[in-house]
Amino acid sequence: MTVTRIYDPPAETAAARVLVDRIWPRGMSKQRAALTEWCKAVAPSTELRQWYSHDPELFDEFSRRYEAELAAPERAEALDHLRGLATEGKLVLLTATRRPEISEAAVLARLLNS
């Protein structure tokens, strides 16, 4: 499983490419994104995303709060869907953030790999 920016060109053509952000990336066309799907339901809440604001010092607390949000039925179902995609083959989790290593995609990758 890979976590990368949606703005980077696709590296693996056989991989399922899933956008896990709630908001569509600025300046990205759907054709250029080359997505398998957009899984908005697994994204963190607007409130959590705004609180976090990708501050590296808040990443641990963001991860804890986000994992708690993932227990909600709709998000848990979306997470299970991603687990299914991961078992079917290669999965690339996409995000628009400049630092994917401290994004919700990184949290999801850790959960899906455990």
Image: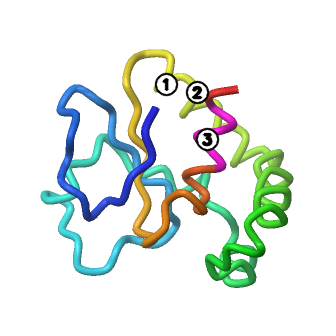
Based on the picture, tell me whether residue 108 belongs to the magenta stretch. Answer: yes
Residue contact at pointers 2 and 1, CB within 8 angstroms:
yes
Q: CA distance from mark 2 to mark 1?
A: 5 Å
Q: Residue sitting at 54 percent across and 57 percent down?
A: 101
Q: Residue sitting at 31 percent across and 80 percent down?
A: 26
The residue identified by callout 1 is 86
Q: Looking at the image, which is closer to me, 78 or 88? A: 88
Compare marks 3 and 1 and give the one earlier in the sequence. Answer: 3
Q: What percent of the width, then of the height, locates residue 114?
A: 70, 26
The residue identified by callout 3 is 78
The residue identified by callout 2 is 83
Identity, as a three-letter code, of the amino acid under mark 3: Ala
Q: Looking at the image, which is closer to me, 15 or 43? A: 15
**What span is colored magenta in the figure?**
107-112
Disc 2: CA contacts within 10 A as few (<14), some (14-19) or many (>=20): some
The image quarter containing residue 5 is bottom left
SS assignment at label 3: helix
Vertical comparison of 66 with 52: above or below: above
Vertical comparison of 112 with 8: above or below: above
Q: CA distance from mark 3 to mark 2?
A: 9 Å
Q: What percent of the width, then of the height, locates residue 111?
A: 69, 36
Identity, as a three-letter code, of the amino acid under mark 1: Ala
In the picture as drawn, the residue positioned furthest to the left comes out as 31
Identity, as a three-letter code, of the amino acid under mark 2: Arg
Disc 1: CA contacts within 10 A as few (<14), some (14-19) or many (>=20): some
